[in-house]
Amino acid sequence: MVFAVLPLFITAGLGAPALAVGIVEGVADGSSAVVKLWSGWYSDRIAWRKRLAVGGYGTTVVGLGLLLAVTSWPQVIFARALAWMGRGLRQPIRSAMLAGSVDKADLGKAFGFHEALDTAGALLGPAVAFILLAAGHGFRTVFAVALVPGVLAVTFFGLLARDPRTKRAQSIPIRQPLPSAFWRLIAAVAVFGAGNFATAFFTLRVVQMLRPELSQAAALSAAVGFYLAHNAVGAAVSFPAGWLADRIGKVPVLATAYATFALACVVGVFGHGWVAVALLALFVGAQNPVVSGVESSLSSSIVEEPRLGTAFGVLNAVNGVGDLASSVVAGVLWTFVSPAAAFGFGAILCAAAAAVLAFRPPRPAP
């Protein structure tokens, strides 16, 4: 609900340039990456990791709640960063708990199902935001309503989730390395992350692609509709993609998802009008949850359970650093060169990541 309108709030509501969107998104992802690395490592060494994850959910709600009080875009940096630090605290723990709850043969389906539900929430949220904006309410009304599912998320995770570990976590030698196959995966993840800038830039680009045929107000509403549409695509493809990854292999599915983001960037460079916006929604929606789900399930198939928290901390941290770099670079290119330069940058790096994964595939343990 919040992230559907946040780039529009920053640019149209607060009058900031597109560079501000890149800085806000990049700083949030960078701060989250640092927390993820520590949280994953630490969670493997404690028995109370679930309580730490609950605290992460709560921190996200507090951070997003601060958006109600901001009056300038630099203040958004603090609120967004706090919210994403909470995400960084919980994400490796949640992923490790999920991976430990299913057999390795079902990891693709498990993470695909998780991403389908997560994306369904990201579909429902923008739908509510779209209705509120269309009814004449402002951005801050959207932020206030978003606190309700935020509080419910904290409550439900605290009451319903269970840590699958059956005994107290034992200390693991710091020098014990993660498998070489995992680091091979991380190399491809790093290249992709460097080009995989925030979806917010696609939202901004949609407004341009529909102008001048639509008024500014209508184009802004259509941009929220795009956010809703690409999440609908993601919710539809996540579980089938996870099932397919369990059947034909996780590496080819992940490489295809990387290449799909590159295609979305190509549409961002050349597209205009409703057909281009529809293609953008299809490509962006098809890759986003599939990348997240298959990266997670592939990591889980390579790394054994006692070090899953550490592995997910590394995976999420590398993704976060990549998001920081890619969002800031995309913002600079968009502001000082052109939107086409930003999307061309993303297309080249993400296509390269697909090639790295295809030609040097990580081999999961049998």
Image (cartoon, rainbow, N blue to C red):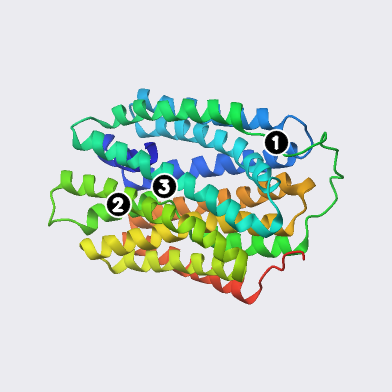
Residue at screen point 26% across, 35% down: 13
Query: Whole-Å distance between the Cαs marked 3 and 2?
Result: 19 Å
**Element at label 3:** helix
Q: Which amino acid type corresponds to the residue marked 1 in the rendered image? A: Asp
Query: Whole-Å distance between the Cαs marked 1 and 3?
Result: 36 Å
For discs 2 and 1, the disc positioned in front in the rendered view: 1
Q: Residues within 10 Å of mark 1 (few under 14, many from 20)?
A: some
Numbered label attached to residue 22: 3
Q: Residues within 10 Å of mark 2 (few under 14, many from 20)?
A: many
Q: Which amino acid type corresponds to the residue marked 3 in the rendered image? A: Gly
- Find disc 1 in the rendering and name its residue: 163
Quadrant in which residue 41 is drawn: top right
For discs 1 and 3, the disc positioned in front in the rendered view: 1
Q: Return the residue nearer the eye: 20 or 201.
A: 201
- Residue found at the far top of this picture: 69
Residue at screen point 39% across, 51% down: 231
Total marks in image: 3
- Closer to the N terminus: mark 3 or mark 2? 3
Query: Whole-Å distance between the Cαs marked 2 and 1?
Result: 37 Å
- Asked whether the viewer can see residue 96, the reply is yes
Q: Quadrant of the N terminus?
A: top left
Q: Quadrant of the C terminus?
A: bottom right
Q: Which amino acid type corresponds to the residue marked 2 in the rendered image? A: Phe
Q: How far across and how far down the image is residue 350, in percent?
A: 49, 66
- Closer to the N terminus: mark 2 or mark 1? 1
- Residue found at the far bottom of this picture: 359
Q: Return the residue nearer the eye: 3 or 81.
A: 3
- Find disc 2 in the rendering and name its residue: 226
Q: How far across and how far down the image is residue 324, in percent?
A: 51, 49
Q: Are marks 3 and 2 in contact (CB under 8 Å)?
A: no
Numbered label attached to residue 315: none
Residue at screen point 22% across, 45% down: 221
